[in-house]
């Protein structure tokens, strides 16, 4: 199992930036990929962006539109999400996710991001 702890959420104005971090511990060497998801009030949790731990390949949801950048530090087992040009529609709880090669999945507790108009 992988243990995940997010940090870096907060309140920002429209057009502002935030950087989220996710610290991974436990069976990190078995991680296939990590991702950021988000869940807004009254909506389902949705994928924001994913990165493959070994190759560094990424994918992102269409709504990202190049505003967010996922990155990682394998030596520190850290995942990051740099969010720029934030919009009120980006307000949500952001979750860190890790999937191991055997299919086991882990979630962090989430960090609140609020974008004021």
Image (cartoon, helix red, strand yellow):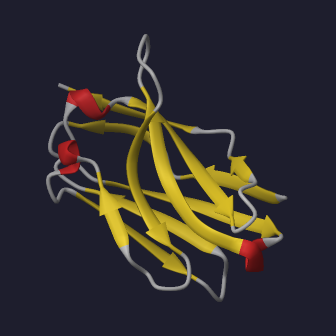
The image quadrant where one finds the C terminus is: top left
Which quadrant of the structure image shows residue 95?
top right
Q: Residue at x 16, y 49 (%)?
A: 85
Q: Is residue 89 left or right of residue 28?
A: left
Residue 47, position in %: x, y? 41, 43
Q: Residue at x 19, y 35 (%)?
A: 87
Q: Is residue 58 left or right of residue 68?
A: right
Residue that sits furthest to the front in the current view: 102
Residue 86, position in %: x, y? 22, 43
Residue 74, position in %: x, y? 60, 84
Q: Is residue 75 above or below residue 10?
A: below
The image quadrant where one finds the N terminus is: bottom right
24, 31: nearer the viewer: 31
98, 18: nearer the viewer: 98
Q: Is residue 16 above or below residue 115?
A: below
How many labels, in total? 0
Residue 2, position in %: x, y? 79, 60
Q: Residue at x 19, y 46 (%)?
A: 62
Q: Is residue 70 left or right of residue 8?
A: left
39, 13: nearer the viewer: 39
Q: Is residue 86 left or right of residue 98?
A: left
């Amino acid at each position: 199992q992988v243990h995940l702890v997010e940090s870096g959420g907060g309140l920002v104005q429209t057009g502002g930036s935030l950087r989220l971090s996710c610290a991974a511990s436990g069976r990190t060497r078995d991680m296939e990929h990590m991702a950021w998801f988000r869940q807004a009030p009254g909506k389902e949790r949705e994928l924001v962006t994913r990165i493959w731990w070994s190759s560094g390949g990424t994918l992102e949801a269409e709504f990202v539109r190049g505003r967010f950048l996922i990155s990682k530090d394998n030596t520190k087992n850290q995942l990051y999400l740099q969010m720029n040009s934030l919009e009120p529609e980006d307000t949500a709880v952001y979750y860190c996710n890790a999937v191991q090669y055997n299919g086991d999945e882990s979630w962090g507790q989430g960090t609140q991001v609020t974008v004021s108009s």
